[in-house]
Image (cartoon, grey):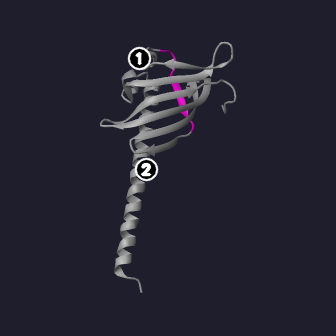
Amino acid sequence: MKRPGSILFLAILGVLLYSNSAQAQYEEDAVKKVIRTMFDGMRAGDSSMVHSVFIDDVRMQTIAPNRQGQMSLRDGSLTNFLNAVGTPHDQVWDERILDYQVKIDGAMAAVWTPYEFYAGERFSHCGVNSFQLMKTAAGWKIIYLVDTRRSDNCSN
Protein backbone atom coordinates (compact mmCIF):
# COMPACT_ATOMS: atom_id res chain seq x y z
CA MET A 1 0.00 0.00 0.00
CA LYS A 2 1.32 3.42 -0.93
CA ARG A 3 1.52 6.09 1.68
CA PRO A 4 -0.52 9.25 1.11
CA GLY A 5 2.64 11.34 1.50
CA SER A 6 4.35 9.69 -1.47
CA ILE A 7 1.30 10.27 -3.67
CA LEU A 8 1.27 13.93 -2.68
CA PHE A 9 5.01 14.18 -3.37
CA LEU A 10 4.56 12.69 -6.86
CA ALA A 11 1.66 15.04 -7.58
CA ILE A 12 3.68 18.10 -6.51
CA LEU A 13 6.68 16.90 -8.52
CA GLY A 14 4.48 16.50 -11.61
CA VAL A 15 3.08 20.01 -11.23
CA LEU A 16 6.57 21.49 -10.82
CA LEU A 17 7.93 19.66 -13.87
CA TYR A 18 4.97 20.79 -15.98
CA SER A 19 5.34 24.37 -14.72
CA ASN A 20 9.06 24.46 -15.57
CA SER A 21 8.39 23.02 -19.03
CA ALA A 22 5.63 25.56 -19.69
CA GLN A 23 7.88 28.43 -18.55
CA ALA A 24 10.73 27.23 -20.79
CA GLN A 25 8.37 27.05 -23.78
CA TYR A 26 7.05 30.54 -22.99
CA GLU A 27 10.61 31.96 -22.94
CA GLU A 28 11.54 30.17 -26.18
CA ASP A 29 8.43 31.56 -27.88
CA ALA A 30 9.24 35.06 -26.59
CA VAL A 31 12.80 34.82 -27.99
CA LYS A 32 11.51 33.63 -31.38
CA LYS A 33 9.00 36.49 -31.43
CA VAL A 34 11.85 39.02 -31.12
CA ILE A 35 13.57 37.53 -34.15
CA ARG A 36 10.35 37.31 -36.16
CA THR A 37 9.65 40.97 -35.32
CA MET A 38 13.04 41.95 -36.72
CA PHE A 39 12.40 40.12 -40.01
CA ASP A 40 8.80 41.36 -40.23
CA GLY A 41 10.18 44.89 -39.86
CA MET A 42 12.71 44.25 -42.62
CA ARG A 43 9.97 43.00 -44.96
CA ALA A 44 7.84 46.06 -44.13
CA GLY A 45 10.76 48.51 -44.44
CA ASP A 46 9.93 49.62 -40.88
CA SER A 47 13.16 50.66 -39.15
CA SER A 48 11.32 51.52 -35.91
CA MET A 49 9.99 47.97 -35.68
CA VAL A 50 13.46 46.58 -36.32
CA HIS A 51 15.04 48.97 -33.80
CA SER A 52 12.62 47.85 -31.07
CA VAL A 53 14.27 44.42 -30.74
CA PHE A 54 17.89 45.59 -30.30
CA ILE A 55 19.85 47.16 -27.48
CA ASP A 56 21.36 50.42 -28.71
CA ASP A 57 24.98 49.24 -28.51
CA VAL A 58 24.39 45.89 -30.24
CA ARG A 59 27.38 44.33 -31.99
CA MET A 60 26.71 43.28 -35.59
CA GLN A 61 29.09 41.33 -37.81
CA THR A 62 29.09 39.40 -41.08
CA ILE A 63 31.33 36.55 -42.21
CA ALA A 64 31.47 36.47 -46.00
CA PRO A 65 33.94 36.29 -48.88
CA ASN A 66 35.67 39.55 -49.73
CA ARG A 67 36.38 40.70 -53.29
CA GLN A 68 39.40 38.40 -53.42
CA GLY A 69 37.20 35.43 -52.45
CA GLN A 70 38.74 35.05 -48.99
CA MET A 71 36.55 34.80 -45.89
CA SER A 72 36.49 38.01 -43.94
CA LEU A 73 34.79 39.36 -40.85
CA ARG A 74 33.08 42.71 -41.36
CA ASP A 75 31.69 44.89 -38.62
CA GLY A 76 28.29 46.48 -39.10
CA SER A 77 26.34 49.04 -37.14
CA LEU A 78 22.77 49.26 -36.00
CA THR A 79 22.51 52.80 -37.42
CA ASN A 80 23.56 51.66 -40.90
CA PHE A 81 21.27 48.64 -40.73
CA LEU A 82 18.28 50.75 -39.67
CA ASN A 83 19.01 53.31 -42.40
CA ALA A 84 19.18 50.54 -45.02
CA VAL A 85 15.91 48.99 -43.82
CA GLY A 86 14.13 52.34 -43.61
CA THR A 87 15.31 53.68 -46.97
CA PRO A 88 12.63 52.97 -49.56
CA HIS A 89 13.60 50.18 -51.94
CA ASP A 90 11.73 48.69 -54.88
CA GLN A 91 11.80 45.11 -53.65
CA VAL A 92 10.77 43.52 -50.37
CA TRP A 93 13.73 42.24 -48.35
CA ASP A 94 12.54 38.78 -47.41
CA GLU A 95 14.82 36.79 -45.15
CA ARG A 96 13.17 33.39 -44.86
CA ILE A 97 14.13 31.54 -41.69
CA LEU A 98 14.40 27.80 -42.26
CA ASP A 99 14.76 26.67 -38.63
CA TYR A 100 15.21 27.95 -35.08
CA GLN A 101 17.62 26.33 -32.63
CA VAL A 102 17.13 28.08 -29.29
CA LYS A 103 19.16 27.67 -26.09
CA ILE A 104 18.26 29.65 -22.96
CA ASP A 105 20.01 30.00 -19.62
CA GLY A 106 18.30 32.47 -17.33
CA ALA A 107 18.59 35.91 -18.90
CA MET A 108 20.70 34.80 -21.89
CA ALA A 109 19.53 33.14 -25.10
CA ALA A 110 21.42 31.91 -28.15
CA VAL A 111 19.57 31.31 -31.42
CA TRP A 112 20.87 29.71 -34.63
CA THR A 113 18.74 30.37 -37.72
CA PRO A 114 19.63 29.10 -41.19
CA TYR A 115 18.07 31.39 -43.82
CA GLU A 116 17.55 32.23 -47.47
CA PHE A 117 17.42 35.88 -48.50
CA TYR A 118 15.27 37.15 -51.37
CA ALA A 119 15.07 40.61 -52.89
CA GLY A 120 11.50 40.49 -54.06
CA GLU A 121 11.18 37.09 -55.75
CA ARG A 122 14.89 36.96 -56.71
CA PHE A 123 17.12 34.71 -54.59
CA SER A 124 20.14 36.67 -53.32
CA HIS A 125 22.04 34.53 -50.81
CA CYS A 126 21.79 32.12 -47.91
CA GLY A 127 23.60 31.52 -44.65
CA VAL A 128 23.10 31.34 -40.92
CA ASN A 129 22.32 33.97 -38.32
CA SER A 130 23.66 33.57 -34.80
CA PHE A 131 21.80 35.75 -32.30
CA GLN A 132 22.67 36.43 -28.68
CA LEU A 133 19.84 37.91 -26.64
CA MET A 134 19.47 39.22 -23.12
CA LYS A 135 16.30 39.40 -21.08
CA THR A 136 15.92 43.01 -19.95
CA ALA A 137 13.22 44.82 -17.99
CA ALA A 138 11.64 45.56 -21.41
CA GLY A 139 11.83 41.90 -22.50
CA TRP A 140 14.24 39.97 -24.69
CA LYS A 141 16.61 42.14 -26.77
CA ILE A 142 19.26 41.25 -29.35
CA ILE A 143 22.72 42.11 -28.01
CA TYR A 144 24.86 40.45 -30.71
CA LEU A 145 24.21 39.30 -34.25
CA VAL A 146 26.67 37.61 -36.59
CA ASP A 147 25.71 36.04 -39.90
CA THR A 148 27.27 34.17 -42.77
CA ARG A 149 26.46 34.93 -46.39
CA ARG A 150 27.03 32.82 -49.47
CA SER A 151 25.40 32.34 -52.85
CA ASP A 152 26.39 28.70 -53.38
CA ASN A 153 25.58 25.50 -51.47
CA CYS A 154 22.09 26.80 -50.77
CA SER A 155 18.95 24.68 -50.81
CA ASN A 156 16.91 26.99 -53.09
Q: Residues within 10 Å of mark 1 (few under 14, many from 20)?
A: few
Expressed as whole percent of the image width and height from the top left, the position of residue 11 reads: 37, 70
Badge number at residue 79:
1
Residue 120 seen in the current view:
no
Residue under the image location 38 percent in, 41 percent down = 107
Nearer to the camera, 38 or 142: 142
**Which residue position holds label 2?**
25
Horizontal side of residue 131 vs 11, given as left or right: right
Against 12, is 118 above or below?
Answer: above
Horizontal side of residue 147 vs 25, given as left or right: right
Nearer to the camera, 74 or 93: 74
Expressed as whole percent of the image width and height from the top left, the position of residue 20 reads: 40, 56
Q: Residues within 10 Å of mark 2 (few under 14, many from 20)?
A: few
Q: Quadrant of the N terminus?
A: bottom left
- 3D distance between C-alphas at marks 2 and 1: 32 Å
Residue under the image location 50 percent in, 42 percent down = 102
Instruction: Magenta stretch: give its range.
Output: 89-98
Nearer to the camera, 18 or 110: 110
Horizontal side of residue 94 vs 3, given as left or right: right
Residue under the image location 46 percent in, 34 percent down = 132
Against 17, is 112 above or below?
Answer: above
Instruction: Farthest residue to the bottom: give it.
Output: 1
